Amino acid sequence: MMSDSQRREQLIDTAIDLFAKHGFHATGIDRILAVSGVSKKTLYRHFRSKDELILAALRKYDGLFRNNFMREVESRGTTPKERLLAVFDAARAWFEDNSFYGCVFINAVGEFSDPDTPIRHICKEFKSLIRGYIEQQCRALGVADAGALAEELSILLEGATVTAQVSQNRGRAAEVAKTAATVLIEKAMSESGVA
């Protein structure tokens, strides 16, 4: 028998899966309860509203995704340049996975238009942390304007993610982004006198 905390986690995990596949507005509480096998009483003991469940799902997904993504990047590259390029290899692996339905944070921003909501703030924070990780690698690379290079690479990653979501050739989106990233990284290194 599941403990109360296990039921809470079951709700969150089910919500993450259903929100990713079907969207936030299209996924009702009754569906989450039916799939999770958790009672409505238990749901409302932990979450006062669907928005609170969405926030919990986004927070958990944020931690899981970022940790897995960074681990994947670092397993593919040992130098800062290799890691920056590995961002796009890790993205390709994510895009080609059967559980890829686009970026859940981009999808959330699309469904929640008010810019001053906790949901939008979590999405913004997630994107900022990913960009921060990329900038950390750019700084380690030793280029003069690590912030500018990180911004360019982050935009490539975002563009590749959206393209992979809407296109039928997901691997190609990552491949094209990696090619462009290579040019930007080499240009920044050249301009900075980094070998």
Image (cartoon, grey):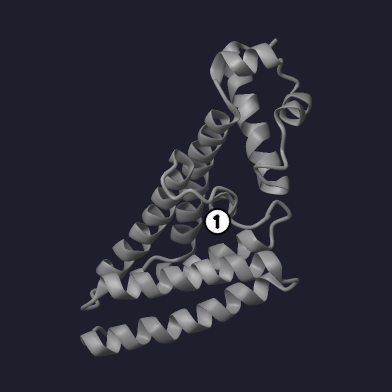
Image check: 157 left or right of 50?
left
Corner quadrant of residue 39: top right
Residue 2, visible in the rendered structure: no
Percent x, y for residue 174?
59, 73
Please provide percent x and percent y for residue 175: 59, 77
- Could you say which quadrant of the image residue 11 lies in? top right
Task: Sort mark 1 into few (<14), some (14-19) or many (20+) by Cα contacts within 10 Å.
Answer: some
Residue name at image x 39 percent, y 83 percent: 184
Residue visible at 76% across and 30% down?
31
Residue at point 52%, 77% (across, down)? 178
**SS at mark 1?**
helix
Q: Quadrant of the C terminus?
A: bottom left
Is 132 positioned to the left or the right of 119 in the image?
Answer: left
Q: Nearer the viewer, residue 112 or 91?
A: 112
Height in image: 194 above or below 37? below
Give the image location of residue 26, x and y in percent: 72, 42
Q: Quadrant of the N terminus?
A: top right
Q: What residue type is labelled 1?
A: Ile
Q: Name the residue under label 1.
A: 106
